Amino acid sequence: MERRHLSLSPSAGRYATLLALAAVPVAVLAVFFVLPVIGMVGRGFRPEGHWDVGGVLEVLRRPRVHRVLWFTLWSSTVATAFTLALGLPAAYVLHRLALPLRGVVRAALLVPFVLPTVVVGVAFRELLTGPLSWLSIDGTPTAIIAGLVFFNVAVVIRAVGAAWEGLDVRPAEAAAALGAGPFTVFRTVTLPALRPSIVGAASVVFLFCATSFGVVLTLGGLRYASVETEIYLLTTNLLDLQGAAALSLLQLTVVVTLLGIGARLRPQRASTQRAPSRPRRPRLADLPQLTVTALLLIFVAAPLAALLVGSLRTEGHWTLANYRALTSTGSHQALLEPVTTALDLSLRIAVDATSFALVLGLLVALSVSRRGTGHREGRAERRVRGTLDAFFMLPLGVSAVTLGFGFLVTLDRPPLDLRDSPWLVPIAQALVALPLVVRTLVPALAGIDDRQRQAAASLGAGPLRRMLVVDVPVLWRPLLASAGFAFAVSLGEFGATSFLARDENATVPVVIYRLIGHPGSMNYGMALAASCVLAATTAVVMLIVERLRVPSLGVL
C-alpha cells in the first residue's frame, strides 16, 4: 500500500505556530476578561432575568449622564491639549539635546505615569490645600485637569521623543541646505514625520484621561464625576447595574475606536537605511523649549514635594510620627491591619502579578511579532496578527471598575468560584499591566533581523540555540523593563483592587483611600506617609527601567 507523507506548508506551519503561541493568552483573557465583562454587562441588560435593552438605552437619556459625558469629554480634551503643549517641547529637549543628567530627568518625568492614581490625587490635594491654597482651586475641574496632565505627560515624552530621536536627519539637512529656516524645516519636514506619533500619543492620552479613576475620584469627589467614577458610583452606592452597563458599553466603544486609531497611526518598523541624529549641544534658539521643560519639572516636583513635606510635619513641627504610625491601625481603628502589613501584601501581590503579566505578555508579543524565518508574510497572516494584537489590548479599554465588579459577579460559582482565592487580585492587576508589557516587548522582537536567525540555522543551530544566541541578547533588557512597568503598575492599581481586596487584606492604594476618608489628623498624616513610601518605591523602579534605556510607553 502506498504511504502518503503529510507535511505542513510553510504558511500552514506559521499559522500553527501562531495559534499555539496565542492559545494560552487567548484562553486566559477569555476566562478572566471577556467572561467578567460580559457577566457585568449582562447583569445590566437582564436585571430581572429577561432582556431589557430599552432600560439600558434609557440610561443614556438621563440628565446626570449627559453631564457626566460632557464633563468627561471636555476635561479629557483640555487635559490632552495641555499634555501635548508641555510634553512636545520636553520630548525635543530630552531626546535631541545633549544635557547633563538627561537620563535622570527622563526617569523623573516618567515616575508620575506609574504612580498610583490615588497617590497623585493625595499629592495634589496636599499642594492645593497647602502652599497653593490661595488659588482656591481644590475640588474644582482645574485641579482634576492638572492631575490628569501630571499623570499623562510621560506618554507624550516617551512616544514622541522616541520617534524624534530616531528620525532620519538627511531630509532636514537637505531642506536646510536649500535655504529653509529652522521653523520651515520643522513645519515641512520634521512635523509630517512626527505626525503619526503625535496623533497616536494624543489618542492614548485622551483615552487615559477619559478612563482615569483614582485622580478624578480623589480630586473631584462625587461633585465632578467622569464616566469611570460614575460607573463606580452606580455599581457600589446605587446598585444600578443597568446604568453601569450602559456607560461601560459606551466607554468600550469609544476606547476600541481610539485603539483602532492608535493601531493605524503606530509607526511601522523603521528602515535600516536611515541616519538618526545624535544629541547636540543646546543653542540659544532652544531656550523656549528648555524653559517649558524646566517649568514641567517644577510642575511634576511640586505636588510630590508637598506630599513629602506634609508627611514630615505634624501640628507645625518636623517629625517622623506619621511614618511611625504606619505600624498602627490609625485613630478610631480606621484600618483592620497596619499599613506595613498592607505594604508587605502589596509587594507580594505585585511580584505575583508581574510574573503572570510577563509570561502572558511574552507569549502575546511572540504571537503578534514573530514572522516565519525566510518567508514573506501574507495579507491574511497580517490580518490575524492585527486582530490578536487588538484583542490583547482590550483590557486597556475597559473600566477597571467594570473588570473588578465583573470578577465578583461571574467568578462566584464552581468551577470558577474564586472569590476567596488569593490569586484574584494578582490576576486582575496582571491584566491591567498586560498592555504595557506587550508594547514594551513587541518593538524589540519585531526589530530582530530574521537574517540573523537564518544564519544561525545555516550553521546548524536548532530553535533553542537560535533563541539563546539571537533573541535573548536583544530581549533581556526589554524583559527587565517590562517587569519594572508591570511591578509599578500592579503596586499602584486601585480601580479593580478596590472591589476585590477585602478589609483585612487591603493593598496600600486601597488603605490610603480609606485613611483619607476617615476623619482625624493622624489618619490623614498616615495617608501622606504611605503615599510617600509608595511613590518612592515606584520611583526607584522607574530609575532602574530608565537605566535599561528601553524605548517604551509608545503609542498603544
Image: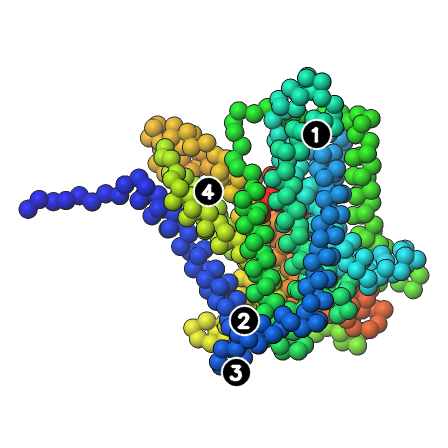
Q: In terms of secondary structure, where does tag 2 sit?
A: helix
Observer-side mark, 1 or 4, equals 1
| Image location (x, y in percent) of residue 335 | 72, 73
Question: Which residue position holds label 1?
Answer: 186
For badge 3, the amino acid type reads Glu
Residue 264: x %, y % from top left: 54, 44
The Cα–Cα distance between marks 2 and 3, rounded to whole angstroms, is 14 Å
**Residue at the extreme left:** 1
Q: Which mark is residue 48?
A: 3
Residue at 48% from the left image edge and 34% from the top image edge: 448
The disc, 3 or 4, on the residue closer to the chain's N-terminal end is: 3
**Image coords of residue 435 (percent x, y):** 56, 51
Q: Marks 4 and 1: in contact by CB < 8 Å? A: no
> Label 3 neighbourhood size at 10 Å, few (<14), some (14-19), many (20+)?
few
The label number, if any, that marks residue 399 in the structure image: none
Front-lying residue, 511 or 224? 224
Q: Given the image, on which type of amino acid does mark 1 rest?
A: Phe
As measured in the structure, the alpha-carbon distance from the residue carrying label 2 to the one carrying label 4 is 32 Å
Query: If you read the primary sequence from the N terminus, does the residue marked by circle 2 or circle 3 appear first?
Result: 2
Mark 4, other Cα within 10 Å: few <14 / some 14–19 / many ≥20:
many
Whole-number angstrom distance, CA of label 3 to CA of label 1: 60 Å
The answer to whether the residues at label 3 and label 1 have Cβ atoms under 8 Å apart is no
Name the spot of residue 188 as percent of width and height, x first: 67, 29
On the picture, is 37 further left or further right than 217? left
User: Badge 2 local density, few (<14 within 10 Å), some, or many (20+)?
Assistant: many
* Mark 3 vs 1, N-terminal side: 3
- CA–CA distance in space, label 2 to label 1: 49 Å
Residue nearest the observer in this picture, 168 or 443? 168
Q: Amino acid at mark 4?
A: Ser
Instruction: Provide the residue designation for mark 4.
Output: 369
Name the residue tied to disc 2.
40
Task: Tell which tag, 2 or 3, sits nearer the viewer.
Answer: 3
